[in-house]
Image (tube, rainbow, N blue to C red):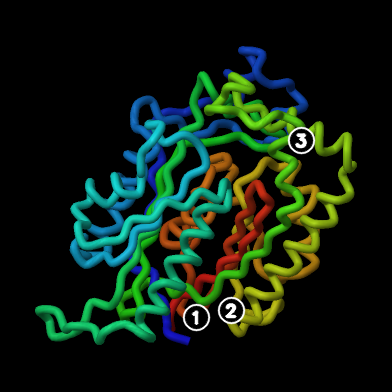
Amino acid sequence: MVPIGIVAAQLRLPDGRATIAEALAGGRLRARDAQDLGHDEVPVSDGESPPELAVAAARTAVEVGRIDPLDIDLICHAWMYYQGHDMWSPAHYVAGELGARNTMPVGIQQMCNGGSAALELAAARLSFEHLVGSPLVPGPNGRAVGRLALVTTGDRFDGPGFDRWRSDYGVAYGDAGTAVLLRVPAAPEDPLLLRAIATVAAPELELMHRGDDPFGAAARTVREVVDMRATKRVYLKAHGSEAFVDANRAAIRRVVATALADSGLAANDSRLRYALLPRFGRKTLDGSWFPMLTDALTAELVDIGRDTGHLGAGDATASVADLLTDYKLAPGEAALVFSAGAGFTWSCVVVQAPY
């Protein structure tokens, strides 16, 4: 397998904050719901749009990685919620703002698992081009740059169409932009390697976010505010909770087993340092993720989203960025990065520090 390098990864959190105390005081949350979430606050954008947050993260990633945007072959931009215009390509906006005029911009809309999906598709495209494409041309230093892909995400969960505290069960939504720069083949200076990505889907669960609502002619014509609680209640009334619980458990087991097998790691491998969990509320993590992964892995389990909340499509890419700052890996150490999203889809990304 051709080595895939992570050249740089960045998380752009806006300066604003929405606090749980304010949500309680304003009657947007009950005390029990606040306790279930486990967050004190989440990041809030007071002006930057989702694509602008993505561009800010991307600019820093390109600068840190010392990459010319003209050398980027592919840009995959993922999102969960509204990007600021009705009929428009935010992926092309990201490319244009970066000056990446030679790239192919692609939009990825796979809900909360969008960042992982974008990483997987970008890595597959780079690997394919490396195998069948034309030979790389050496740069000014005599060494080929490699084929490059940029993955970005951007989400902002603002009113009037979304309530970050109560549009969903067990999740508080934070605003952020993320960027991960991939290179094939990996270069010696790349700080991390992308070793594997495993993804599992259960499309029969799409009903959880559709409910019995009719198909609308335009956005938010059926409901003025996104209400995933209402659609989930419809699903639970019709099917009970066991179908989702069973699918969730099976998917977590499968992505772990597949990701470990593909990366050549064992569940009790001493090199496996961290398992970074999806940025869900504490009750959701305690109900399934912590118990299952505690039994399956010896790695340290990290509630990485405690200070950010759920970042929409950016959960996984934000966690990759955190592996370069707060959760650095020693040479040879590896981490599992988890994400999951409506549909449903689950992913496990294996990242390793080179020796």
Spatial CA span between label 1 and label 3? 42 Å
36 relative to 26 in the view: left or right: right
Residue at 51% x, 71% y is 351
Kindly identify the residue that appears in the image at 34 percent across and 65 percent down: 149
Can residue 226 be seen from the camera position used here? yes
| Marks 2 and 3, how far apart at CA | 39 Å
Q: Which residue is mark 2?
A: 271
Query: Which of disc 2 and disc 1 is earlier in sequence?
Result: 2
User: What's the residue at 48%, 87% (across, down)?
Assistant: 1
Dot label at residue 332: 1
Q: Nearer the viewer, residue 290 or 149?
A: 149
Sooner in the amino-acid sequence: mark 1 or mark 3? 3
Alpha-carbon span between mark 1 and mark 2: 6 Å
Q: Is residue 21 visible?
A: no
Query: Toward the viewer: 231 or 165?
Result: 231
Check disc 3 and report its element: helix, strand or loop.
Answer: helix
Cβ–Cβ under 8 Å for marks 2 and 3: no
Image quadrant holding the C terminus, namely: bottom left
> Can you identify the residue that label 3 sits on?
232
> Measuring 49% from the left and 26% from the top, which residue is drawn there?
158
Identify the image quadrant of residue 231: top right
Return the x and y of residue 354 as percentages of the image width and height. 43, 80
Residue 150 position, x and y percent, is: 35, 60
